[in-house]
Image: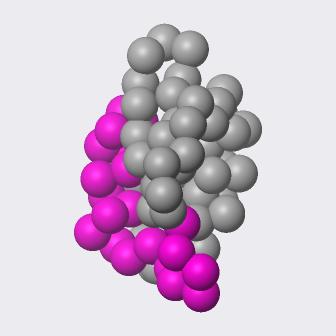
Amino acid sequence: MSLKPQPPAKIIKALSKLGFKIVRKHGSHVVLKHPDGRLTVVPVHAGEEIGTGLLHKIIKDTRLSKEEFLELL
């Protein structure tokens, strides 16, 4: 299954299932941190989805495989 653009709320919810917590919001960006130190930033712009390039970056930051990430969605 391939990555498709996703709404930011869906990504934040999926990462929350893994234990990521929102540590701060700066403008339109939400910073999430896992207790083991992994950190990622999710931009939240009204009416916009997160594209595949940024989804790959979030997957890399969270040290998940693409398959693991897609299962969470």
First to last magenta residue range: 44-64
Going 45% across and 73% down the picture, which residue do you hit?
50
Q: In the displayed image of the protein, which residue is found farthest to the bottom?
A: 47
Which residue is at the front of the view, 37 or 17? Answer: 37
Rendered residue at 38%/62% (across/down): 55
Q: Name the residue: 62% across, 36% down.
A: 22
How many numbered circles are shown?
Answer: 0
Say whether residue 43 is magenta: no
Estimate the x, y position of residue 27 in percent, counting from the top left. Answer: 48, 57
Residue 47 percent location from the top left of the image: 59, 87
Q: Is residue 41 left or right of residue 13?
A: left
In the image shown, does 29 or 73 lie closer to the viewer?
29
Query: Image quarter for residue 11?
Result: bottom right
Colour mapping? one colour
Identify the image quadrant of the C terminus.
Answer: bottom right
Residue 59 in the image: state x and y as whole percent. Answer: 38, 48
Picture layout, residue 59 above or below residue 61: below
Residue 39, compared with residue 1, is above or below; it is above
Q: In this view, does 26 lie to the left or right of 46?
A: left
Would residue 67 be visible to someone looking at this image?
A: no
Q: Against 56, is 24 above or below? A: above
State the residue in front, 45 or 49. Answer: 45
Magenta highlight on residue 63? yes
Q: Where is residue 31 in the image (x, y as percent from the top left)?
A: 49, 41
Residue 62 shows up from this direction: yes
**Image-based side of 55 in relation to 67, left or right:** left
